[in-house]
Amino acid sequence: MSESKDQQVRYVVEGVALGVLAAGIEALPAVKMTLELNFNSVWRRWEPAAAFPSLARAADPGNLFYLALHRSEGRRWGAGRWQIDGPWARPFLAEGWEPSEIEECLDQFADERASAEDWRRFGRLYVDKFEAGEILRG
């Protein structure tokens, strides 16, 4: 059975949170246009994107990402989430995970669609799209 659009988007939002954390980033600017455009730029050249057809075929996958990012904090499932904290979008690990366990968390999260290294790569590429003064490093 294939995943619904919402399931695919939630999975990607979680994977990006883990990838950004693995890149050593504490927070990104919570500016809609910046988050979306930077996401779209990386998404369109990230090979595993094809494994998530609901986003890969979307006219604006960054908007789907942005909307789901805002809803991720209150979710009870998944290891990676986002919190909007004033001007910041902060990725964080769910209860039960320590920041030092990000690599183990990524290994458990990865599946046949995208490996742990794929998510680390996405996180690095995404973070690199932001100006140095726009991000908070952990």
Image (cartoon, helix red, strand yellow):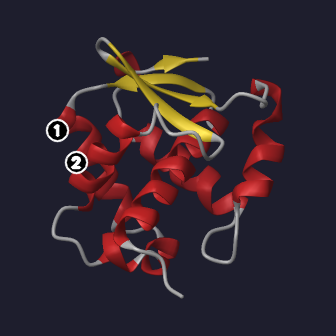
Taking depth in this image into account, of 69 and 21 the one nearest to the observer is 69
Taking depth in this image into account, of 15 and 2 the one nearest to the observer is 2
Taking depth in this image into account, of 83 and 126 the one nearest to the observer is 83
Image position of 97 (left or right of 72): right
Relative to 55, residue 120 above or below: above
Hey, what amino acid is under mark 1? Met
Relative to 67, residue 54 above or below: below
Circle 2 SS class = helix
Residue pictured at 46% horizontal, 22% vertical: 27
Circle 1 SS class = helix
- Residue 10 position within the rendered picture, expressed as x and y whole percent measured from the top left: 45, 55
Q: Which mark is drawn over residue 74? A: none
Q: Which residue is mark 1?
A: 33
Image position of 55 (left or right of 104): left
Q: Which mark is drawn over residue 37? A: 2
Residue pictured at 53% horizontal, 41% vertical: 17
Hey, what amino acid is under mark 2? Leu
Separation (CA) of disc 2 from disc 1? 6 Å
